[in-house]
Image (tube, rainbow, N blue to C red):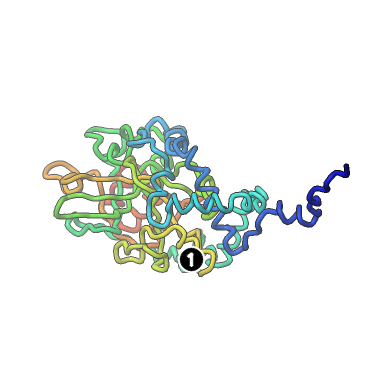
Amino acid sequence: GARRAGPAPPSPAMVSVRHRKPRVPSSVRWRLNAAASAAAAVATAAAAVAVHAVAFAPWAKLTASPATSGPLLASALRRPGFGARAFARRLQVGRSAVEEADDGGNDDSINVELFRQSLIQGWGGGVVGGSTMDVNRDWATILNASEVRAGDLIMGDPAAFLEGEGGDEGPRRVGLKGRVMSDWPTREKLRMMPVVLLTRVDTDRGTAEGLWLTMRTGRLMGDFVSHFQSRPLLYGGPEEAGLTMVHPYPQVPGSEVLGENGLYIGGEFTGAQDWVEEGEGSSLRFRFFMNQVRWGPGEFAAELAPGSGRSPWIPVRCNSDLVLSEVDSSDDMPLWLRVARLAGGAAEEAARKHNLDR
């Protein structure tokens, strides 16, 4: 008997339609890239948290391990605007489209970002990140302990951080195992002299939190996410904390005023991306920190104004551009010395006394 004919095979056009990957609008492709990068980074971020202990040769042995070695972005993704579940959903929906669109040109994209941001903001007086920055207008002034508030700086006193007599409360507070060796080159000693931006100060309880401004982890944000790729990931201190942003932009949703000199802290990560991508912001004006420095009840008050002996800290107030400045070459003056010279008084005297101002 005649065999009954089966269904006709699909036409080539139908096959191509059925198997064609969905196209993602360019307006949301970068968000999917960020989702994919962030989710992939979680699996390997534990190693990145510890990288600061080996990234600062020859002074690496002086740096203590962080209080915990939990994943860097695992904690960061729990913060508002960096929701892990939302990122995971985006990843499931669009990962194939991201992989199709991604050409793997990571280094090139960093260079493009740097060029683009330099056009938006300008290089500004030799300081990366904005034409509004004027090194001739930088200022700093010494504070009394009773005047210190969030947004101010505390500089490590060389008498408490360089090799010599006395305790090591100051070095251990920022995660160092001990004092800095006296026979190190001047520039390396200055690199280890902490400048801490205070993010919270509770005078009633004597507590505080802050971020070490100048200690790099050796990693870039581009190692974890596809935006802010050229920005260094900084070691904020030894106490576990989520990813922290400091910037000058009130336009970032959820950001909070930090002091009275034009600084802001936190906000939505995606909102910061939007402001850079679609607004007038520059990625070069953002600082990203892993972990923080923390003082428990009574500790900050005791260190800043000890009843006897000398404080390991010199409190200073300065302009926001100085806080956001970066040292990008061996010709740039380290931040500790810049602030000391501008503040004068006890800070500049300490620099001269310990042969740091040369």
Asked whether residue 208 is in view, the answer is: yes
In the picture, measured across the screen, residue 349 lies left or right of residue 252, that is left
Residue furthest front in the image: 1
* Spot occupied by residue 118 in the image (x, y as percentages of width and height): 56, 63
* Spot occupied by residue 173 in the image (x, y as percentages of width and height): 28, 40
Residue at numbered disc 1: 275
Neighbour class for label 1 at 10 Å: few (<14), some, many (≥20)? some
Nearest the camera: 272 or 134? 272
* Spot occupied by residue 273 in the image (x, y as percentages of width and height): 49, 61
Nearest the camera: 275 or 134? 275
* Spot occupied by residue 53 in the image (x, y as percentages of width and height): 42, 34
Nearest the camera: 15 or 37? 15
Asked whether residue 220 is in view, the answer is: no
Residue furthest top in the image: 61
Q: Is residue 85 above or below residue 130?
A: above
In the picture, measured across the screen, residue 264 lies left or right of residue 26, that is left
Instruction: Tell me which amino acid carries mark 1.
Output: Trp
- Residue at the (57%, 58%) spot, across then down: 30
Quarter holding residue 308? top left
Q: Is residue 231 above or below residue 121?
A: above
- Exactly how many numbered labels are in the figure? 1
Which element carries disc 1, helix, strand or loop? Answer: helix
- Residue at the (41%, 43%) spot, across then down: 191
Residue furthest left in the image: 307
Nearest the camera: 357 or 28? 28
In which quadrant will I find the N terminus?
Answer: top right
- Residue at the (32%, 32%) spot, across then down: 177
